[in-house]
Image (cartoon, coloured by chain):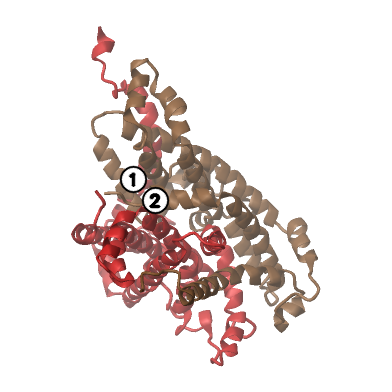
Amino acid sequence: MNRNRTNPVGVVIKYVILIAVSVFTAFPFVWMMFSALKTKQEVMSGGFFPTNPQWGNLISVLTASPIPHYIANSALVSAAVILLQIVTGALMAYAIVFINFRGRQALFAIIMGTYMLPVAATYIPSYIILSDMKLLDSLTGLVISSTISIFGIFLLRQAFMQVPKGLVEAARIDGATHFRILWEIVFPITKSSFITFGLMSFISTYNNYMWPSLITNSKDKYLVSQGLRSFFIESGAYGTEWALVMAASAVIVVPLLVLFAFTQKWFISGIGGDTGMKG
Amino acid sequence: MKHKTHKLHSADIGTLALFILPALIPLIVFWIYPILRSIWISFTDWDFMTPDYSFVWLKNYRALFRDSRFYAALTNTLVFTLGTLIPSVAGGLGLALLLRKNFRGNGIFKFILFSPWITPTVAISIVWSWIYQPSDGIANAVLSLFGLAPLKWISSSQTAMLSVIIVTVWKSLGYAMIFYISALEKVPGELYDASAIDGAGSINQFLSVTWPGISPTTFFLIIITMVNSLQAYDQIQILTQGGPSGSTRTLLYMYYQLGFEEFNMGKATAVAVVMIVLTGGLSLLQFVAGQKWVHYGE
């Protein structure tokens, strides 16, 4: 009977496939860390494991390179962006779900329409706008141009729709303002979506590359992606210093992996649960 | 007795403004206006350096449609989009089917498979460019383990697109998988029981119960992966810069080169408009097709 799902051959095949794909997936991370711990000669000569781990590579990236500065820029910009995107997104999603006003449907349709558009199509005019505001090559310009997240508005709207309407109505009858309802009723119920949104917003801002690289020129304004790229290019001047480049990548990637290990469930529930289309 | 007739979900204009404007103003300034402005610029010969420009109507579009680079970029975009879409969605579904039941190690597999998605594309593309090094890279060492001839990976126009696709699929596989895992959880268990009573084998059961049940997710993933592929920039910029000899120049990369390297803003925005039309058209097509074969649960 093929209804018996626990036949041992099937289980072995399942594990073989999963392990093979996982090895393929994890390999670049492992290779990055091994390469980061090798000497310049060893990294080229092709041994698999670092024979004598060069922790000094990591220390020199952390103390004698601009990488920590880029990490600080990315962290600062993403903190500001998360805050703005959550506030603007929550207010807008609340209005769309709980307040009746003319043009509500049209407004939501426009927001959804922009969700599908290629962001890059906005870059040339947005560049001009920032230049007119004298905000090119500044972290402020980067933050201001990322004030909203269309994805976030959509995610919070989906979550708010699950809040029982009766709760909101009762609070209105008791004379609560919309701000109080959002903060004291809707937010506590939908907290998990806020956490997911915050994490997603953090990842996309922290890792962002194309837009920041277009509007920032001076090195002290680089976010991690652009900073790492310039580190990569410069260390290529006399034959790429792969060990140092991998050490710099590791310094940027490993903390994110650790963060992810602790926050995995929020990403997974957010991606799978709330954004899938539901009729 | 004003507040008795006051509608529960209404708000005075000031409150409404406070809720809507913080998002609406940036939406207009950094999304809607730039899109419209892009369309306008695509009808001009503006070069960014000088303030004056003249209206040239369809000249940029005519130049674009006569440019062989444009058709090469269009083909590359199509190859890249299908080349990333099909393995990511099919592979994501396969992995989700394997991981759907709870078993020892389930969580670790999910963690590993999803982790590329949260790491910066630039950093991992640099790692991959080291893996791909023709002489000292590990990719060729692995090939030789299997007795295969070494490849030039990102240094040859024959294999550069494949190399970029591998990195992109590597990054997005776990994302599709997570969508499917939660979609599979939502397929009602009684449907499986019913089909088991009917004596359906596992393949039949997949086709008659699982596949229709997860079709909204497939539909959503196809659109979102397509939009992401059309916008892929980071890995192309790091790995190949659109080369060698234009073999990985997608529409988006062409837009970047025209706009921010050649400062041909009119032609660049014409490419942007083509991308907008493409995305819009494909989404619409997907939507119409979706009405026919996507089964939404009751």
Horizontal side of residue A154 vs A206, given as left or right: left
Q: Which mark is residue B204?
A: none
In the image, is residue B36 above or below residue B130? above
Question: What whole-number distance in Å separates the C-alpha atoms at marks 2 and 1?
Answer: 8 Å
Residue type at mark 1?
Answer: Tyr
Dots 2, 1 in contact, CB < 8 A: yes
The chain letter of the brown chain reads A
Q: Quadrant of residue B281?
A: bottom left
Chain hosting mark 2: A
Q: Quadrant of residue A129?
A: top left
In the image, is residue A61 above or below residue B25? below
Q: Please tell me whether mark 2 sits on a helix, a strand or a loop.
A: helix
Task: Tell me which residue sits at (74%, 69%) in the image.
Answer: A37
Q: Nearer the viewer, residue A271 or A118?
A: A271
Q: Which residue is mark 1?
A: B33
- In the rendered image of this protein, which colour is used for chain B? red
Q: Which mark is residue A125?
A: 2
Q: Please tell me whether mark 1 sits on a helix, a strand or a loop.
A: helix
* Residue A236 visible, this angle: yes
Discs 2 and 1 share one subunit: no
Horizontal side of residue B237 vs B185, given as left or right: right
Residue type at mark 2?
Answer: Pro
In the image, is residue B138 above or below residue B9? below
Q: Nearer the viewer, residue A180 or B156?
A: A180
Task: Tell me which residue sits at (36%, 69%) in the image.
Answer: A3
Pick out the residue farthest to the top.
Answer: B1
Horizontal side of residue A80 vs A34, given as left or right: left
Q: Residues within 10 Å of mark 2 (few under 14, many from 20)?
A: many
Chain hosting mark 1: B
Task: Tell me which residue sits at (37%, 15%) in the image.
Answer: A175
Residue A243, percent from left and from top: 71, 71
